[in-house]
Image: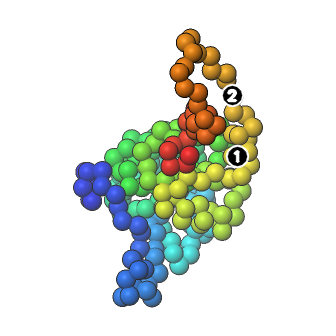
Amino acid sequence: IPPYGPRLRRPPYGPDLSRPEDKDKTATMRIFILAPTPMMQAGLHSLLTSNEIQIIGTSAQPGALSEVATDIDVVVVADELLLEELAPTLANTPMVALVLLTNNEERTLPRLRALDVRGWGVVPLDASALQLQAAVQAVAQELVILPKVHMQRLYDNRVLTEVRTIEQLDETLTAREHEVLELVGLGLSNKLI
């Protein structure tokens, strides 16, 4: 059971800046880096280091995450192959968000959508420090992040199928209803629609 009770939402990371006593405090996100080599771990540690981000740990083994899962906000994964091994751990910690570094989003998007995480994002392997930090901050706020080039590819490759009904419906669908059905067919969530 997560520390905030079963399926309860974790409050946003950091201090409550709406309270006067917290106005001067800086929000700190807790990050865990999962990368296959020590060199990649060190590189990501360097890219993610900032005043707003605290690196809780790094590892090449997804099992290491389970020891600190309740203390982190975002997991940064540098290898899509680690995603399969990470899925069982993430299933037990739905309050965690995930950022995946990959250039092959077509294969990973269905897996990411199936995960029960707070938010998730795909970032290209050549992302800058600012892009990576922005993605981490966005997924911590329960957003889904895709680079423009990936989103354009998804949009261009979508398959629109003609729906044929056996019986004539009494009512016709509005243009918005058709649009929503297309977006649902692409696998987008209510929040994204």
Q: In which quadrant of the rendered view does residue 22 lie?
A: bottom left
Q: Give the farthest residue toward the front.
A: 170
Q: How many marks?
A: 2
At 53% from the left and 21% from the top, the residue drawn is 170
Give residue 193's position: percent from left, percent from top.
Answer: 56, 46
Q: Is residue 13 above or below residue 190?
A: below
Q: Does label 1 or label 2 sit earlier along the sequence? A: 1
At 71% from the left and 56% from the top, the residue drawn is 126
**Is 46 left, or right, of 89 in this rendering?**
right
Q: Residue 160 carries which label?
A: 2
**Is 118 left, or right, of 171 in this rendering?**
left
Q: Which mark is residue 190?
A: none
| Residue nearest the observer in this picture, 144 or 55 | 144
Q: Is residue 63 above or below residue 15?
A: above
Q: Is mark 1 on a helix, strand or loop?
A: helix
Give residue 20's position: percent from left, percent from top.
Answer: 38, 88
